[in-house]
Image (cartoon, rainbow, N blue to C red):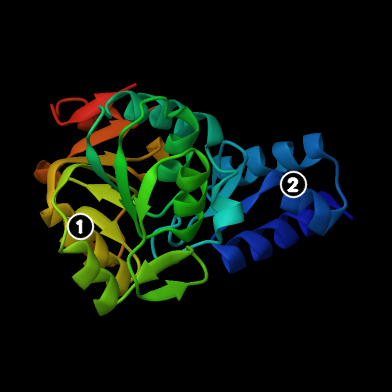
Amino acid sequence: MLAEERFDEILKYVNQEGSITVQKLIEYTNASESTIRRDLNTLDKRGLLVKVHGGALALEHNAALKDSMVNVREELNREEKRKIAEYAASLISPEDVVYLDAGTTTGYLIDFLKTKGIVFVTNAVMHARKLVEKGYTVYLPGGQMKAVTEALIGEDTIESIRKFHFTKGFFGTNGIDVEAGFTTPDIREANVKRYACAQCKEIYIMSDSSKFGTISPVTFLPFEKANVLTAGEVGSAYEIYKNIIFI
C-alpha cells in the first residue's frame, strides 16, 4: 500500500471512530508500528487529525462531539491519565464519601487507592466492580446503562445520586473551555454529572491535556466551579487560572 493510500485509510478509520489507537491502526492497515506512528505525525502536521499519546483523534470533533468506546479511550494519553489519577487518589481521606464519575481517567484512580474506610458512589459498573474487589463500600445507582461509556444514566440514576452528600467528587469531561465550562456530548450523561456535582462539597475534574480548548455540545458545570487536575501541555492561556492543578 502506498503512503497516500494508507493516509486515506487512517483518516477514514479515525473520522469514523472519533478516536483510535495505534494498535487498531496496525491491525486495520497491516503496517508496522513505526510506520503508523510516522504516518500519524505526518497527518498531524498536515492538520488532518490530532495525534495523541497512543493514537489519534478526529480533527472534526476532537473527541468532543461523539463518545468513543471505553477500550479505545483507555489507550489514549495513558501516562497523563495515570499521573492525574495517582494525584487524585492522594486527595482522598479515610471516611470520605466519594462520587466517582464514569470514564477512563477516573477509572485509573482506583489503581492508586491505598486509604481504607472510604465509601464510594459511582455510575460506572466497571468502577464499582473494581472498588468492591479492593474491599470498599460501593453504592451503584439504578438507571439505563449506556453501552459506549458503560455509564448508568437517566432519571433513576439522578434520583439515587440525589440521596447522597459527597465530601469529594471526581469527574471526567470531554471538553474544557473557560467560557463554555466543562462539556460532554450526551445530555443524559451531562444531567447525571450536573446533579452529582451539586451534591459534592469539593469537585475535581480529571482531564488529560487533549480536552483543553475543546467544547462538546452540553455544559454540565461552569469552569470556575471545580478544580482541574491535569498533566501535559495545555497552552499558556490556561496557566493563569488558579483552579487548574498541574501535576
Q: Above or below — where is 64 with respect to 153?
A: above
Q: Residue at x 51, y 55 (%)?
A: 126
Query: On screen, 220 above or below 100?
Result: below
Secondary structure beneath dot 2 equals helix
Viewer-closest of 199 and 218: 199
Q: Which mark is residue 196?
A: 1
Along the viewing direction, whichever of 84 and 68 lies nearer the viewer:
84
Classify the position of the C terminus by image quarter: top left
| Separation of marks 1 and 2 at Cα, in angstroms | 35 Å
Quarter occupied by residue 198: bottom left
Residue 133 picture location, percent across and down: 53, 43
- The answer to which image quadrant residue 40 occupies is top right
- Residue 236, given in percent of the width and then of the height, sits at 26, 27
In the picture of the structure, the residue carrying the numbered disc 2 is 23
Name the residue: 66% across, 65% down: 12
Q: Nearer the viewer, residue 72 or 217?
A: 72
